[in-house]
Image (cartoon, helix red, strand yellow):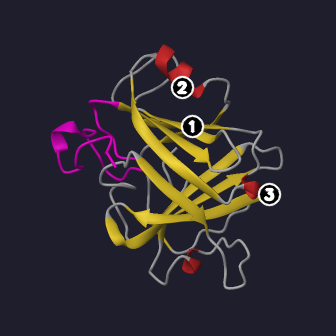
């Protein structure tokens, strides 16, 4: 597994005021992220993580989330996050996102809240994966869509309040559906593990 960027402690490559971020920012590259559905086919979400560059339709230090309205999150049992570098031009970004509409335009400044987030949208699923920063812990990914299938929120869970979601964004990370003790889909991170949970979402993030 390769990492898209260098260690977060290499401050010369970070945002001038790194604060708290979702995906870590490396001023050397723009990062493209895909949430690929397993078994259903196609990308559920495509994310562009900007660095300090500006393009015709993208501002620096923002995350742009494009959602696939043709895939219902309720049908997804597993997915894979894939990350790589992308050329810093509007043409390259447009080619990556394709016809997938832009649903979320977020600041990279993120606040980590202690507790459990209560999702409110019509469609929602929680997934889990091994935390690349600590193989003894897990992370959670909560995806919400509205009734029309538009991407409404993406919430991340970690077992600690972090500066960023990852110290280095992994090139690939596999997620599986979280289930309760009866085998039904669960939205409770405590069904991932009995740690103290911290979450960041567009509700807690700077806008």
Relative to residue 167, is residue 106 depicted above or below?
above
Callouts 3 and 2 close, C-beta under 8 Å: no
Q: Residue at x 29, y 46 (%)?
A: 18
Give the SS element for disc 3: loop
On the rendered structure, is 81 left or right of 6? right
- Residue 150: quadrant of the picture: top right
Please say whether residue 39 is one of the residues in the magenta stretch.
no
Callouts 2 and 1 close, C-beta under 8 Å: yes
Q: Which of the two discs, 3 and 1, sits closer to the camera?
A: 1
Q: Nearer the viewer, residue 160 or 93?
A: 93
Residue 60, image x, y percentages: 40, 29
Q: Nearer the viewer, residue 85 or 187?
A: 85
Gap in angstroms between the C-alphas marked 3 and 1: 21 Å
Q: Residue at x 80, y 57 (%)?
A: 122
- Disc 2: which residue: 96
Residue 19, image x, y percentages: 31, 51
- How many residues crowd around disc 1 within 10 Å: few (fewer than 14), some, or many (20 or more)? many
- Disc 1: which residue: 46
Callouts 3 and 1 close, C-beta under 8 Å: no
Gap in angstroms between the C-alphas marked 3 and 2: 28 Å
């Amino acid at each position: 597994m390769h990492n898209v960027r260098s260690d977060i402690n290499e401050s010369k490559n970070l945002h001038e005021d790194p604060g708290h971020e979702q995906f870590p920012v490396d001023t050397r590259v723009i990062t493209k992220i895909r949430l690929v559905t397993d078994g259903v086919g196609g990308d559920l979400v495509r994310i562009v993580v900007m660095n300090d560059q500006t393009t015709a339709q993208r501002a620096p230090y923002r995350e742009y989330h494009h959602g696939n309205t043709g895939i219902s999150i309720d049908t997804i049992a597993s997915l894979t996050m894939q990350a790589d570098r992308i050329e810093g031009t509007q043409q390259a970004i447009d080619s990556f996102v394709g016809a997938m509409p832009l649903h979320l335009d977020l600041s990279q400044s993120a606040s980590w809240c202690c507790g459990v987030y209560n999702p409110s949208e019509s469609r929602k699923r929680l997934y889990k994966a091994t935390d690349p920063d600590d193989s003894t812990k897990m992370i959670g990914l909560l995806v919400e869509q509205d009734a029309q299938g538009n991407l409404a929120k993406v919430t991340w869970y970690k077992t600690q309040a972090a500066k960023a979601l990852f110290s280095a964004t992994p090139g690939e990370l596999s997620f599986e559906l979280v289930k309760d003790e009866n085998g039904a889909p669960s939205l409770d991170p405590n069904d991932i593990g009995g740690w103290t949970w911290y979450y960041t979402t567009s509700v807690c993030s700077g806008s």
